[in-house]
Image: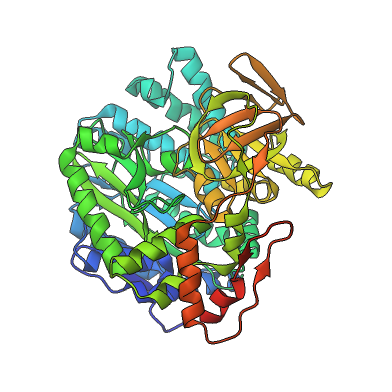
Amino acid sequence: MTEKMIYSFGAGQTDGSADMRDLLGGKGANLAEMASLDIPVPPGFTITTQVCVDYLKQNAFPEGLWEGVKEQMALLEEAMGAQFGGDENPLLVSVRSGARESMPGMMDTVLNLGMNDKTVVALENKSGNRRFAYDSYRRFINMFGNVVLEMEHHDFESKIEAMKQRKGAGSDLDLTADDLAELVDEYAALVEEKTGSSFPQDPYDQLRLAIEAVFNSWNNERAFTYRRLYHIPHDWGTAVNVQCMVYGNMGEDCGTGVAFSRNPATGEDALYGEILFNAQGEDVVAGIRTPEPIESLKQKMPGCYSEFEEITEKLEAHYKDMQDMEFTIQNGRLFMLQTRNGKRTAAAAVRIAIQLVREGVIDRRAALQKVEPDSLDQLLHPMIDAEGDLKVVATGLAASPGAAVGRVVFTAADAVERAETGEPVILVRQETSPEDINGMNVSQGILTARGGLTSHAAVVARQMGKCCVTGCSALNVNANEKVIRVNGETVSEGDFISLNGNTGEVILGEAKLKQPELSGDFATLMEWADEIRTLGVRAKHHQGHNQKISNTTLKNIR
């Protein structure tokens, strides 16, 4: 294999660019692009999608890859003034997937790689923060155990939940440094019990195993399902991004968040996002804790907020589209970890396309190409009739608009089973995970007790055009007993509930629905399509309604 296998980004040496997404994946290409735009990006390198394809064919690294990885790690050590596995100033890295088409949460990530019994002490001494060091180590053992060693996530989760109960801790943040050090020992013992081997201490062993695991995650069940649903070829492979860690979990002047440059549910031209202070990135997208609105960053760290606003505007102007961004703040300093064109509902797609034309960013033809023709049926989904007799029992976050009426189910498998018999179902979870994708796909709507507007449930639901309510903290979801307890009411599996994705309301029983009104923006878009089209129009009639959508018009223009 003679072609270039590894591309650097950041630290004064950037090889890639945004137009290399087929080779570098979306994440790697955009990290390189941001670095070239002088946006603060932690340095790293990307292993190409072609390497993944070759690895999966021969089940081994191509010749020269591992030597190249070690050379890149030496460059990162030099750039950061740190040593991978060092006992004074240890370098830690993240290992993340990155396909050429965005597949949110479907493949694997490992953070804090390079931690071991020696580097945790070095990290404590270097940072002066024992709690941060052991919090990082327990997170790493959990992620590495789950992603690389194929252990069950709930085995680790049960350990931390048991510790919180013993210590009287309401959340992870209430655990002390000593508690977390004890948890590290429990996690290490769990690894030995489940795998028959002790947790790997050599950082380069960890790195090699993590790269292999991310390559292999291209073929996991949830990634395969996602590709099938969204017509993504199975032979593309994923890139792997190895990047220096920045820490959102060092204290109160640290945090991590996800934001969209415009509202992905409605298309409103306003920054839309969330942040968790003293946390790491996976906490936000996994929905483990319900984050704070992005506006809270403006109150706590106005300088960081202003810088983030400027970067958001710069990225949207550069890519000429709404951006979905991940960021981390370490000791008051902002770092960008990802940008990509954001997933959005059909209503948001139409509104954003119109706005971008009126702002002079794109022309009308480009606007039409930003709206997926097959998504337009979402605009005809019924809404809750607010004038009906509604028994609202709780309100969560309105994560994806529309309405849903269905029978409660608590697992993705049950959702699939009931849906196959023609029953409408609503999937209710503490928080969703990427493994729930099949269940989400067949459900009328999704309801979660935890997680925010940028959690996995919210992002995937918006892309699917599914009604979704997240972060409904009043819910007590007991998946084992298959009941929800909420404000004095008990809802069992098979009972009907309704969701209002526009308000976040959870309603007992079958709410009355009404047909939506199409927006003026939609009419404008169709006028533009009629002006530009070069082929005949075949209007798509939505059965049972009097609206018509010129689906083929858009397809002809695309």
Q: Position of residue 493 (x, y in %)?
A: 74, 29
Q: Is residue 506 left or right of residue 327?
A: right
Rendering quarter of residue 255: top left
Q: Residue furthest right?
A: 421
Q: Which residue is nearer to you in this view: 382 or 432? A: 382
Residue sitting at x 30%, y 27%: 131
Q: Is residue 150 left or right of residue 546?
A: left
Q: Is residue 385 visible?
A: yes
Q: Is residue 527 left or right of residue 280?
A: right
Rendering quarter of residue 253: top left
User: How are the residues colored?
Assistant: rainbow
Q: Residue furthest left?
A: 303
Q: Which residue is nearer to you in this view: 228 or 458? A: 458
Q: Position of residue 21 (x, y in %)?
A: 41, 72
How many numbered discs? 0
Q: Is residue 5 visible?
A: no
Q: Position of residue 529 (x, y in %)?
A: 49, 75
Residue 375, compared with residue 251, is above or below; it is below
Residue 356, compared with residue 174, is above or below; it is below
Residue sitting at x 67%, y 59%: 546
Q: Which residue is nearer to you in this view: 302 or 468? A: 468
Q: Position of residue 178 (x, y in %)?
A: 35, 21
